[in-house]
Structures are given as C-alpha cells and as structure tokens.
Amino acid sequence: MKRPPPLRTDGSNAFAHHTMQVRVPRIARDVVERERLPPRTCEAIERLARDVEEGRPLPAPGPPAPDLETWTAIHAEHPGESWLAAGWFHAEHVFYRELARACRFWETGADPFDGAKEQELSDERPWDRLAEAMARGGTREERVMRLLGASLWGNRVDLSYAAASEHGEPGDSDLLVDERSVALPWLLRAGPHVHVVTDNAGTELVLDLALVDALLEDAAARVTVHVKIQPAFVSDATARDVWRTLERMHQREGDARALASRLRAAFDDERLRLVPDPFWSGSRFLWRAPEHLAAALASATLVVVKGDASYRRVVGDARWPADVPMAEVADYLRSPTICLRTMKSDPVVGLPRGLAERLDASDPRWRIDGRRGVAQAVVPRGAC
C-alpha cells in the first residue's frame, strides 16, 4: 500500500505547525521556570526555544550521547529541514534530544522534566485511579479487560498536553474502536511473553504496571517493558521513572504497596524486564526498527503499544483515510499487537466508515483534544 507522506510543521497541518511554533517553545521555557538549573543551561534552553520559534535549521546531532551514530544517519535523511519546515515526528524528536543535551542529561542524568514528574506522583490522582482499577472483582478475564481500559484512558494524563487531562470520566461514545476482545485471548494464554511499549510516566505508568501485574499472575508469564533511553515529551517513561513509581507505590499502604512488592519480585525472578532502547527516542517509524528490536517484538505473544506518539510511529504519522483498516496500514507487524491510545494528533485509521465525517461535523477538534480513544488490534496472518 502506498503510504501518504508524514505530517509536516510548515503549516500544511495546522496542529503540527502550532505544536512546533507555540507549544514546544512553551515546554522549553516551562523547564526553565520549574527546574533549578544553572544559568548557562537556562541560556541554552532559551536559545533552543527561540530557534524553534524562528524556524531556524534543524541542528546536526552532537555529542555526548550513546546514539550519536544513529542520529547522524537520521539527520542525513532530512537534508535542509528547519524547525518550521520539517517532518513533524522528526522535528519533535530532535527537539527533545536537543533539550536533553542543553540540560547535559548524558553527563549528569539531569531530567529536565523531573519536577513535573515528581509533582504528578505526589498528587492523589495516580493513586485514586489505581485504587479504582484494582478494587473491583470479577474473573481474571474481566480484570484484564478492565485494566486494558484503565491503561488506555490513563493515556489522557499527558504532562506535555494538559488539554487531554481536562476530560472527565470517558463516556460510552469516547472509545471509537474497541478491539480489546481480539487481544484478550493472546494475553490469557498459558505462559505468554507480552511486550509493553510505554508512553507517559505518572498516572498512565501506574495503571500500565497494574496491567503488567495482572498478566504476571500466570507464574509462567513474562513481560518486557520498553521505555525511553532519555527524557522526552515531558512525561514519557524512562527506566528511572519505573523505579521511582515503584518506590512511591511501596511508600503507600494496602494494594499499592503489595503491587510494588509483586512487581519487584517478578523483576528479581527475571519475569519482568525493563528495556531502554535509543530507537524509541529517535524519529524513525516502527517498520524501520533495528533488527534486534524488531526480532524481540516479533517473538512476543502480543505487543501492547501505548500512547499517541507511539501510534504515530506505527502508522507513519500520516493523514490516512480514517476508514482504511489498521491491518493494511500496519501489515509489516510480525506479532499480534494492540494499540491503546487517546487521540492527541490527526493520524487515525481503522474507524467505521463514515464515523470520521460525522465527528468532523459535530466536533472539529475530535482528533486532537484527547477526549476520544481507540483500542485497535492487528493479528498478522499465520500468527498462532
């Protein structure tokens, strides 16, 4: 299938252009206001914010970073691009890499979003959501189904996009596609190996870990959790965020503490693994994953792909016809996969015919405001 071109920041897509010219510089300046940073770091971040606003050329990647060789190759694939005339997916990832470099993350481990992440975990929202998700009884099948939903709607809590967090409880019509039942038999198989590609730390990660715990109730099950190798998109999860979250869980009483203890025991038993990989902080789409990562995902019983940016990585960050089947767009996938995502950008596929047009007429911001969500499954031919 011929793929449409990725969205660009040049104004051809209004939301992409607004994100790069307005939201991204604001994110940079929020870091300066929130974090206690050395003056030279603040100056470097302000220069980066101005460069983005003014549409200067995308900078060539520089040291120090373990992914310099890969990023140099990626940069060569985008000749002559500037912040406001580039592939949106690429430009966003360049920004977060440059922000990490300005904060000397690779030298000091300083997370430019540390304060925002700490504040989220200090709030009661993650723990109230966790208590609600774990309080109800039911069969294991019912609990896994419910936790898939909790994990999906946890994606509304995105520290890079506050508008998505403002919606209340999801309504029946908010879930535009619900294919959780397609994924469920794979998750409930005896001894599955599930891979979870995470998105946001904080509330979303807390609920993701509750889902992981439910999957690990099968003593033969294994779960591999994929995280970013560097801070990105404000609240995207790194390995440090997972351990910080487990520590906060352990400091609480009751179910949260018990959950943390079970997950730590699973990690000690090597049934739970954390895998940071530079690919998730780069701007290549999923069909161009390096072979070691592609092979790992292909070996999974099922892959759970979380969040809007990951969805964009799956579909090529393009404006497809909304009713083109996900199985056709993601025909390169080599293992059963489910995408759990609340919508914060234009790309979407796999909707029932005519639904996008009806939503366009009733709510022009339905693709980007974080209210709606999709749970879309792909089972490759021959999967068994």
Image (cartoon, rainbow, N blue to C red):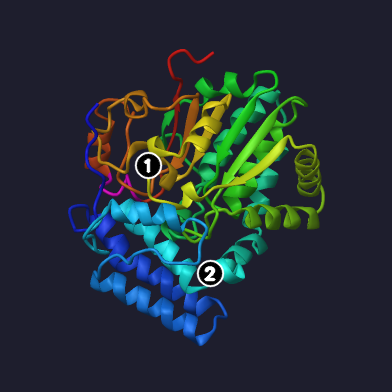
Residue 365 among those drawn in magenta: yes
- What amino acid does circle 1 point to? Phe
| Residue located 27% across and 33% down the image | 322
Q: Which mark is residue 188?
A: none
Q: For the residues marked 1 and 2, what is the alpha-carbon distance in whole angstroms?
A: 25 Å
Between 361 and 62, the one lying in front of the other is 62
| Residue located 77% across and 47% down the image | 260
The residue at which mark 2 appears reads as: 112
Query: Is residue 261 shown left or right of residue 371?
Result: right
- Which x, y percent locates residue 344? 38, 49
- Which x, y percent locates residue 211? 64, 37
Q: Residues within 10 Å of mark 1 (few under 14, many from 20)?
A: some
Q: Residue furthest bottom?
A: 39
- What amino acid does circle 2 point to? Pro
Vertical comparison of 28 with 81: above or below? below
Q: Main secondary structure of the magenta part?
A: loop
Vertical comparison of 76 with 343: above or below? below
Magenta span: 363-368
Image quadrant holding the N terminus, namely: top left
Q: Secondary structure at mark 2?
A: loop
Q: Residues within 10 Å of mark 2 (few under 14, many from 20)?
A: many
- Which x, y percent locates residue 357? 22, 35
- Which x, y percent locates residue 178? 45, 28
Vertical comparison of 68 with 217: above or below? below
Residue 113 lies in quadrant:
bottom right
The residue at which mark 1 appears reads as: 285
